[in-house]
Amino acid sequence: MTGIPLDHNGPTGWPFEPLPESTREAPIGARFAAVAAAFPNRVAVQDRLRALSYRQLETMALRVARAVLDCGPEPGPIAILLRHEARFPAAMLGVMAAGRACVPLDADHPVERNRLIAAHSAATAIITTHELAQDARALFSTAVSLIVLDDCGEPPDLSVPTTGPEQIACILYTSGSTGTPKGVYQDHRGVLHDVAQSVHMAHFSSEDRIALFYPPTVIAGLRTMLSGLLVGAGMHVLPPTQYGRNALVREIDERRITVLRCSPTLFRHLVEGLEPGARLDSVRLVSLGGERVGWGDYDVFARGVSPRALFSVHLGATECWTLHTHWYVDPALRTAHPALPVGYAMPDRETRIVDEDGQPVPDGMTGEIVVSSPYIARGYWREPGLTAGAFAADPHDARIRCYRTGDLARRLPGGLVEFLGRKDQQIKLHGYRIEIGEVEAALKGCAGVSDAAVLVRRDGAGSALALIGYAQLRAGVQGLLPRHLLAMLSQRLAAHMMPAEVVIVDSLPWLANFKIDRRRLALMDAAREVARSPGVEGALVQELSEIFARVLKIGGATASDNLLTMGGDSLQALQLVAEIERHFGVTVTDRRHSATRTLVEWARQIAAGQAESAAPVHV
């Protein structure tokens, strides 16, 4: 598939200067030096504590470069341990200017994760602050050079060695399927090509004020940071975990932010924090990615920003070192495409959809996305075996690398690509292959749902037993019950794809980047399973759970559930009492409280030979 122009149907009225092709044949520092010379006094990056002009940021970066060179000639990478703050870009630019590869670490991540990355990267020095110096030393089993950012003085000579475009610029660590982080590395040419495409796609210019939600330890944060700094834009560091929703909305408004690049979860979170009728009216562009985006997210966009703003969606991977599909969403195509497409193939990224044997599939058929380009990542750092398994050389052009993304998709008429989920999220349940992401998207699309996640409940041997949906409702939604959501899903999903139950929760567990914390979600589900298992009253709770399921047509009642928490009504309350009387051979003498009586309360009373409530609750 060939790409369309990057700004197709996009911000053509917003003036900008494309980065010339010659830019990527020089080091990143050369481009930044030119921008700093053009806008010396303009604010380059600002956090809640400090604002650095382009001249100040360049000076700080050169001080870092000199400190790195003073550590000696060892060619190893340089780790950076900082919080998400305004000086992070200076540390990264300084390491790159010194001709070394930077390994950014997030000080807010678990120590053990950072320790694994520090060891695997074979970093020979680490840049940090006085506050974090002790933590930085503890990441290494042997002594390495410690560069304290606060102590980097004015270098006697601001000149640094010239770095070629093939020099490794950065190593970003992603989560590996085995639990061990993998380092994806890229050279200056690849980074700059990514930035050039990003600038062209969004028409980034010196007039923009761009929100930096994510740190440059992840590809989305690094791309956004460099896309702004290499054109003279103002970068505003706004870590969601440091602000909270209302404060974040206020900062966006007061700083007159023009561009929001984030996950759909974070964007929904922001819009839900607006006062009734209010909009983020300074925003000209909202670009969502990182997780599945639906038409419901477009609706959030339409009510949350100015009518003149644009909405873009993309799909990418750290290993591709950029996006490989993208488009400015056309709402007129909503009827034709019930699932929001992830865009058209990007230029310079040949995007094929192939079968298990690597052969292209016809349009409309499902396959895996394979991206081929001279500009995708160079591979996995110090992992030749992993690199060989995921990356392949193009047999016709040695400059081109091919990467199998693991993303399942199909190409639609006209060239749009529809994302169907991950290969590694496919399961086989009751003889059917099911893509978890498709079920999750359907649950997210239900009226009244703010966000949702679907997990697979498994038995002790690891075999899939059932799909369990967890839903978080939109603010102010009342009266929406699990059975309502199941009814909506039954209109969208085949019977074999239906969750066995849907659980409504006050809040889904989030990671720091506002993606679902699936490990914690699994723990939540396991806790429900424990609550569901027999306790003091032995098998009675389990028998009652089965009765509830027959009456309400919804499984999953726990010991602490009652008819109301499971979405029952007054008619079903009568049916429930009748079933309990028939099954256990008891007489319920007080039926007024049957709707609020929990399973464990029923079990205790049945075990004691009575079925009367001690609480005078009227239903």
Image (tube, rainbow, N blue to C red):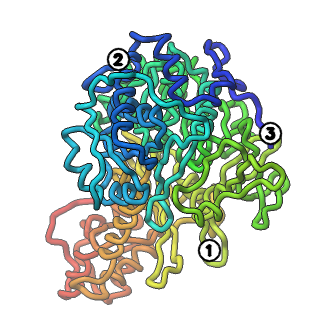
Closest to the observer, 123 or 498: 123
Q: Is residue 238 visible?
A: no
Label 3 is placed on what type of residue? Answer: Thr
Residue 248 percent coordinates (x, y) = 34, 29
Residue 145 percent coordinates (x, y) = 29, 47
Residue, disc 2: 254
Residue, disc 1: 428
- Distance (Cα) linking label 2 and label 1: 50 Å
Report the side of 580 relative to 399 (left or right): left
Label 2 is placed on what type of residue? Answer: Glu
* Quarter occupied by residue 340: top right
Residue 150 percent coordinates (x, y) = 24, 31
Label 1 is placed on what type of residue? Answer: Lys
- Distance (Cα) linking label 3 and label 1: 34 Å
Residue, disc 3: 2
Quarter of the image with the C terminus is bottom left
Helix, strand or loop at label 3? It is loop
Helix, strand or loop at label 1? It is strand
Circle 1: is it few (<14), some (14-19), or many (20+) Cα within 10 Å?
few
Circle 3: is it few (<14), some (14-19), or many (20+) Cα within 10 Å?
few
Closest to the observer, 305 or 618: 305
